[in-house]
Amino acid sequence: MMLNAIVRAAPRASTRIALLAVVCSLAVACSTPAQKTDSHPTYALSIQSGPLEDSLESFLMQTQIEMIYQWDSIHGRQSPAVSGTLTAEEGLSRLLAGTGCRGTWSGVSFAGVQCN
């Protein structure tokens, strides 16, 4: 979650370039989606539809996973409501449905969001 805050707070071009490099590295490292196994915990999710940045914050609070994304790429996008008992992978997939963004995973507790 700390990287998430850093990405959103990046005020300088040089900082943004460095963070973009981190995002690109994460995209390469997370290009293989995680397989659902019994070791993936489930969460009782209740997220309202609305701005994607708000929905992602709610998702992060409810799952306690860590995530990295570029705030500029998600700002202005709308996400659907998500509710039910789901794995983090299922919840994020539903949350990003129709937004033009997709989630990538590294293990069960670290995700990245990439948008077209």
Image (cartoon, grey):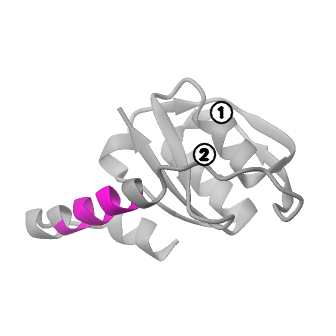
Of residue 23 and residue 73, the one placed in the foreground of this image is 23
Q: Amino acid at mark 1?
A: Ser
- Check the image and report above or below for 55 versus 65: above
Which region of the structure is painted magenta?
18-26
Of residue 97 and residue 59, the one placed in the foreground of this image is 97
Give the residue at mark 1: 49
Relative side of 99 to 62, left or right = left
Of residue 93 and residue 46, the one placed in the foreground of this image is 93
Image position, residue 84 (x, y; %): 88, 42
Give the residue at mark 2: 55
Q: Amino acid at mark 2?
A: Ser
Q: For residue 75, which numbered disc appears in the image?
A: none
**Could you tell me how far apart the alpha carbons at marks 2 and 1 are, in whole angstroms?**
7 Å
Q: Tell me the residue at 54%/50% (across/down).
A: 32
Q: Tell me the residue at 60%/45% (across/down).
A: 55
The answer to which image quadrant residue 12 occupies is bottom left
Task: Name the dominant secondary structure of the magenta segment.
Answer: helix
Image position, residue 61 (x, y; %): 68, 64
Image position, residue 17 (x, y; %): 15, 62
Mark 1, Cα crowd under 10 Å, few <14 / some 14-19 / many 20+, is: some
Where is the C terminus found, in terms of image quarters? top left
> Of label 2 and label 1, which has the lower sequence position?
1
Does residue 111 show up magenta in the picture? no
Q: Secondary structure at mark 2?
A: helix
- Are the two marked residues, 2 and 1, in contact with CB atoms closer than 8 angstroms? yes
Of residue 30 and residue 73, the one placed in the foreground of this image is 30
